[in-house]
Amino acid sequence: MTVESTAARKPRRSSTGGGKRASAKKAAPQQSTEPELVQLLTPEGKRVKSAKNAVYDAYVADITSEELRGLYRDMVLTRRFDAEATSLQRQGELGLWASLLGQEAAQIGSGRATRGDDYVFPTYREHGVAWCRGVDPTNLLGMFRGVNNGGWDPNSNNFHLYTIVIGSQTLHATGYAMGVAKDGADSAVIAYFGDGASSQGDVAESFTFSAVYNAPVVFFCQNNQWAISEPTEKQTRVPLYQRAQGYGFPGVRVDGNDVLAVLAVTKWALERARTGEGPALIEAFTYRMGAHTTSDDPSKYRNDDERVAWEAKDPILRLRAFLESEGHADEGFFAELDDESEALGKRVREVVRAMPDPDLMAIFENVYADGHALVDEERAQFAAYQASFADTPAAGEVK
Amino acid sequence: MAVQKLPIAKAINESLRTALENDPKVLIMGEDVGKLGGVFRVTDGLQKDFGEERVIDTPLAESGIVGTAIGLALRGYRPVVEIQFDGFVFPAYDQIVTQLAKMHARALGKIKMPVVIRIPYGGGIGAVEHHSESPEALFAHVAGLKVVSPSNSADAYWMMQQAIQSDDPVIFFEPKRRYWDKGEVDKEAIPGPLHKAVVAREGTDLTLVAYGPMVKVCLEAAAAAEEEGKSLEVLDLRSMSPIDFDAVQASVEKTRRLVVVHEAPVFLGTGAEIAARITERCFYHLEAPVLRVGGYHAPYPPARLEEEYLPGLDRVLDTVDRSLAY
């Protein structure tokens, strides 16, 4: 089964009856051609060489064994971190976790395509991209533990805060890219979003603005097939990457479980942006192997057969097969990585469990940059109220 | 030539010009702000002099305008955004409330959001639906935003300067029916703080608190009351977030009576907040309950009815009489 035929066109359980679907199809004849999918590694780990991929292939043609091992390491450690976070949620250490399981190749491939001076605007699931940008993974856990609403300095790694309101960050990315162009800089911006967000007005407006101003921004859509319980068919009648055409910039669908193809296509799009050719849309065709978040139960709305089918296209297994068959890595590498993975898991557990609750007065901190009389008044009232309890630590003390 | 007599619209125009000249990071963005100079001509001539890179005609999408302004601010720019009319700000309300207002706090203070959102607001110009509203309370309610409104040309000039210099997002409500009212602007003056209320007319019997377009109505009411031997103090609030409660309190402790006037519906409006706070602060000074004059809990009416809907001289004086009767 090819990637294209799995989830994109297969009718899933749908509230729309067969008759309605048929008539809808008749009313609007198929406008899209068969989705093209850029793939450089098959699910079995075989390198694909084809003329139609040549333009992208060129971006990874001289990739070294070390770089390939690096991609593998990133994916393995990201998955380990993600699994650890899921466990920590189950243990009550985190309030919530949004797992990226299954999307490692989409995130590592695109994240590793960025340059240090590029700027990244994530959703709340871009743990792998954060890893590539050098954000300490434990920093990502603060908001899920409930000790802050962000927690890292976006400018330290050019990695913006997680954005929870769906699609809002695509406009921030576009504005930032407009600024990059005004500054005459040759860096680029990448905006992450998902198949669900593709329905948001902000995403449509970001396409319009970026096209009109020729902003150096790459829109990276991880189509993981599910927006909580709603399949992609509930968001769109055309393959998502084809939307770009209507805005006047290129759209590409890439095998989102093929780290090499994602790396190549994202490098291509970022280079276009840097050289003044404007925005591009990448649809990374992938699959959310787990729940939307730890609060979700996917068995309520999707068939396990689908997940099993996607397991066969696992991004990590396919790169491992390639590394082994082509002699890019030996047993020692994999053994060392296992140890590193264990160590990461241990560190994440320790850091999270030791993460203190914020000081009570943090409620009033950074509400305004220049201060605000009402906040000052309420802070003083709150402090006085808290101080009226004999067993409450004074403001500034850690509980 | 430091002192000029300018209409409010021109004072804002001059203020934007000064900001563009002084700081290369200042940008003007909005629908029709370029060649046309905005539908009220507030940005007239700015694109001609500063170019399309700094005075930016945007696509017709308010969320997009504010959302990209946030991105530009993240890049170090200081965007001044125009929303064409009050009733059209709502597509951008999500970006303003969920993103713009909270960004500084979410980043634990690491990033700032120096974005000004200019909104011509209020009625009295005989406009069609969605062109006459006063939504300031919807913004003042949101932590992270500052909300101001000038009532005269000097404030229009200086408050805009201060709003642009602020590292916090400022929602700048412009009293559109007063755009053509002239007043003196001294560009070499030293302005008072942005969020301080100002006594526009001194009085001893009752305090009228107003802002934006209603200051003029209150000054006229005070002049009319004087003829009847009543001395009304008029306090121009200027800022709805934060509110200068100290100034209101000081005035009420003197006059012992308070009436708050705004075009916006009174229900859960600025006047409600002022009434609650001042009742608490001045409970033993008050000779009468704090009264409010404002819009009704109904959609803004068709233009032929707006004169009766809007607080005017008679309604203000009627309420003054009610207060004095206690």
Image: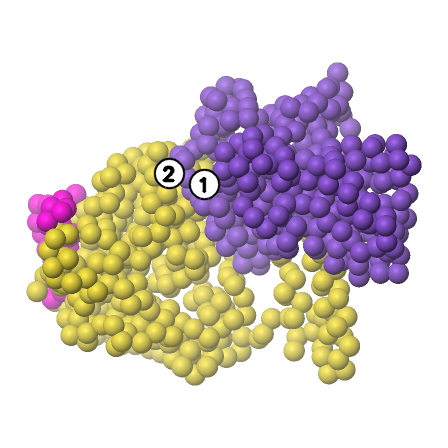
Q: Chain of mark 2?
A: A
Among the chains pictured, the one given yellow colouring is A
Provide residue A96's location: percent of width, then percent of height. Answer: 43, 73
User: The numbered mark 1 sits on a residue in which chain?
Assistant: B
- SS assignment at label 1: helix
Q: Provide the secondary structure element on which disc 2 rests.
A: helix
**Camera-side residue of B260 and B326:** B326
Amino acid type, residue under disc 2 in the picture: Phe
Q: Is residue A367 left or right of residue A56?
A: right
How many neighbours does mark 2 have within 10 angstroms: few (below 14), some (14-19), or many (20 or more)? many
Residue B1 falls within the magenta-colored stretch: no
Q: Nearer the viewer, residue A66 or A42?
A: A42
The residue beneath circle 1 is B62
- Residue A51 percent across, percent down from the top left: 8, 45
Left or right of B218 in this view: A1: left
Three-letter amino acid code at the position of disc 1: Glu
Residue B112, above or below B12: below
Disc number for residue A269: none
Task: Say the numbered circle drawn on residue A209.
Answer: 2
How far apart in space, not on screen, are marks 1 and 2 (Cα)?
A: 11 Å
Which chain is purple in the rendering? B
What residue do we see at 32% from left, 48% from top?
A219
Quadrant for the N terminus of chain A in the image: bottom left
- Residue A36 rendering spot, x and y as whole percentages: 13, 50
Closer to the camera in the image, A202 or B129? B129
Compared to residue B161, the image places residue A48 above or below, namely: below
- The mark total stands at 2
Across and down, in percent, residue A311 comes to 18, 72
